[in-house]
Amino acid sequence: MSSSSNLTFSVQPGGQLTGSIRVPGDKSISHRSIMLGSLAEGVTHVSGFLEGEDSLATLQAFRNMGVKIDGPENGTVVIHGVGMHGLRAPESDLDLGNSGTSMRLLSGLLAGQEFDSTLVGDSSLSSRPMRRVTGPLAQMGAQIQANEDGTAPLKIKGGIQLKGIDYPMPVASAQVKSSLLLAGLYADGETSVTEPAPTRDHTERMLNGFGYQVKRDGSRISLSGGGKLTACDIDVPADISSAAFFLVGATIAPDSDLVLEHVGMNPTRDGVINILRLMGADIEVNNQRDVGGEPVADLRVRSTKLNGIRIPEDQVPLAIDEFPSIFIAAACAEGETVLTGAEELRVKESDRIQVMADGLLVLGIDAQATEDGIRIQGGQLSGGEVESHGDHRIAMSFAMAALRADGAIKINDCRNVDTSFPGFDSLASSVGLNITAMDEE
Ligand code: S3P
């Protein structure tokens, strides 16, 4: 099987989703478990680790910097921490594939090391904006060379003593916040980041779990450099971003009744539930519990009719990765759904506003891209052939659309589904989606 071939999904129309499943582990938490486990003193045991290409790219990067990491085996990873100053210079460039989180968080972490390093990625990652991290890191004293337009490869100079800064973040980005906090571990004095809106706080929670003090004062998050991390055990919940496809699928497909087990319910990530409920979705949150500092629950979702809404802008950062699937819900809703304040969607793994609008139009839905969002008029989805542009979340969202389409949907360029959701097609077909993955030369 050549990796340059086109992996397509072909999804037959109709069906319903029933049963009980656990989707793979949270991507954001999986990345951070490798990073902090590697820098800790002692051995960190991780369970529920996402064995997707993105988090595996982070894992490989730390192996290339001399960290002994066992696994992953059935979601278990054992990290033999080397301490804050124990990483070694990698022998070659660190290849982070499609993973923006790896590149942005590692830029901060590596800016404080004794050695030089170079971060590279695939064509999508190499066209994504990196100035949002290299800019503030430069203010901390970091020397990072990028292309003229601010894109990767990033050449990071080692052996520089960073200094803490007070950074008011212009965009609500957990990746920028986390990058600066990780650089701050190595900086003189205090590093603080002020968020324009709440973003996912897994870095802060996990630093606390590793015994590192992080302070929050309103929207200002700060830490002081020079401390140490102590190994701990991490149970990674199922990824709400992967659960989102099934929340939408079971909502739009008549006669569905589906349970999603052990889903991470961090309040900085639950925008998809809030938005779907505003549209009328029937989502029950059961067995709420706390697992290693992160809230977790089982979600039961049953089909309902949806109404179009104006999506509240304060929900945008809390649902930032779930909009492709929310747009499918909007296509199946009665009336118009309007999203604004979401220009960030244009610089994700693809331009998610344009790519979704194009695909929805192919499927007969009136969808108009705007500068910072989209307007979608609910209607009858038809069959057709759509392009995912190598974006995992676009591919999985259009797969769910077939549940309500009146013809088959073919989706091109689906290989990157493996970055966040290996086994998506078989798990989805086990609960009722009529999906076939095919390799085309
Ligand atoms: C992530 C933060 C989000 C999200 C990405 C993962 C993280 O990006 O889109 O998939 O793990 O910190 P931004 O913080 O840039 O919005």
Image: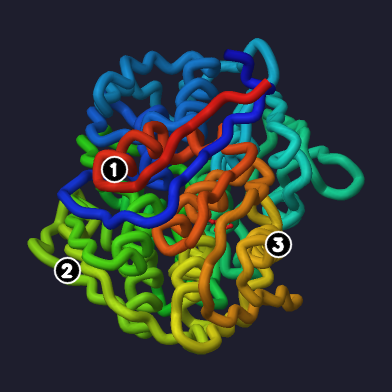
The local secondary structure at tag 2 comes to strand
Camera-side residue: 305 or 370?
Answer: 305
Residue where numbered disc 3 is placed? 358
Residue 258 lies, in percent from the top left, at: 20, 57
Q: Which label lies toward us, 2 or 1?
A: 2
Q: Eyeballing the image, is 88 above or below 157?
A: above
Q: In this image, 107 relative to 58: left or right? A: right
Question: What x and y, as percent, mark residue 81?
Answer: 35, 24
For label 3, count other residues whose C-alpha is less than 10 Å away and answer few (under 14), some (14-19) or many (20+): some
Q: Residue at x 56, y 77 (%)?
A: 196
Q: What label does residue 285 carry, if any? A: 2
Q: Which is more N-terminal, label 1 or label 2?
A: 1
Q: Which residue is mark 1?
A: 210
CB within 8 Å, label 2 to label 1: no
Quadrant (top left, top right, bottom left, bottom right) of the N terminus: top right
| Rendering coords of residue 101 (x, y %) | 55, 45
Circle 2 or circle 3, nearest the eye? 3
